[in-house]
Each structure stands twice: as structure tokens, then as C-alpha cells.
Image (cartoon, rainbow, N blue to C red):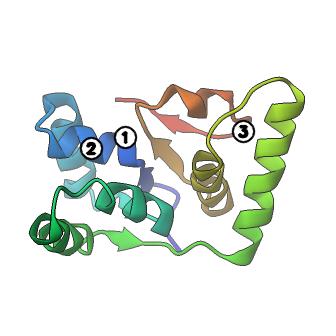
Amino acid sequence: MAGNDSVLVDSSVWIDFLRGNSIATNAIRSLSKARQVVICGQIKQEVLQGSRDAKAFEQLEQQMSIWRYEPEVPGDFIEAARIFSALRWKGITIPPSDCLIAAVALRLKLSLCTVDPDFDSIPHLELHKL
């Protein structure tokens, strides 16, 4: 299990990082130096599916494999559905994939590094802002 000082880094930050965004690059470097970077399957999928071709996919898959990986567990899917439903009942709709990422962060007691404003709506989720 990841330590509480670790940070789950959302695909929104990875995408900015891969595009050369200096804020995201500095954040990843800082978290990496402190050995705080964590990813999960949903984040890895979102990053990889943005590949432009098979060669880029392979390279990106290798790059993503160096980070600490925490897999989703069955309970994360139930929690993700709970988050999604509770927000929808309030008239807020966010992508189910974001709910799954939040469920992983909540279970592991990790902050989530993101630039995606959808996560602002999720109660009890600690955000690591850039």
C-alpha cells in the first residue's frame, strides 16, 4: 500500500506533462524526487489511450511502468458508483472514470494531483493542486 505522503497523479497532469507544460513538469519532477508518485489502472489507461500510434503507445507504456502502481480492487468500483450516484442526486454529473480514480485515492488515503475541476465536487477527496 502506498504511504500517506504519496500522491495519486491524475491523467490530466500526465497529459500536461507529456505536452511539456512547465507547471505539470515541475510537479512531476518534485513528486518523483520525493518518491511520491502513484498511478492506478484507470489513470494508466487514460494516458495510454491518447497515444498517436503503436510505437508511441509502446514508449508511453514503458514510461508509465516506472511509477508506483496501485491496482483497483472490487470495492473501488462500488465506491465509484456511490460517488457518482450521490453527485448525480445533487444534479452534478462527472465521468465515471473520475469517480473510480477518486475511489482509489480515498481508499488509499492519498491526495490527488489533478488539474481537472470535476474532482472539486467529490467530498472528502484531498486535492494536491499544482
- Which image quarter holds the N terminus? bottom right
Instruction: Give the residue number, with chain letter if any, for mark 1.
Output: 12
Q: Is residue 95 left or right of residue 18?
A: right
Asked whether residue 27 appears in the rendered view, the answer is no
Splitting the image into 4 quarters, where does residue 120 fall?
top right
Q: Is residue 71 visible?
A: yes
SS for callout 2 = helix
Question: Could you tell me which residue is drawn at 82 percent across and 23 percent down?
Answer: 91
Classed neighbour count for the residue bearing mark 3: other residues with Cα under 10 Å, few (<14), some (14–19), many (≥20): few
Q: Secondary structure at mark 3?
A: loop
List x then y, in percent, for residue 18.
17, 46
Callout 1: SS:
helix
* CB contact under 8 Å: marks 2 and 3: no
Query: Reading the chain from its start, which is encountered first: label 3 or label 1?
Result: 1
Name the mark on residue 24: none
User: Within 10 Å of the Cα at label 1, are there few (<14), some (14-19), or many (20+) other Cα atoms?
Assistant: some
Residue type highlighted by circle 3:
His
Kindly identify the residue that appears in the image at 17 percent across and 48 percent down.
Answer: 29
Which residue corresponds to the image point at 49% horizontal and 72% vertical from the top-left? 70
List the residue tagged with mark 2: 15
Label drawn at residue 124: 3
**Three-letter amino acid code of the residue under disc 1:** Ser
Which one is in front in this view, the residue at disc 2 or the one at disc 3?
2
Measured Cα–Cα span from mark 2 to mark 1 = 5 Å
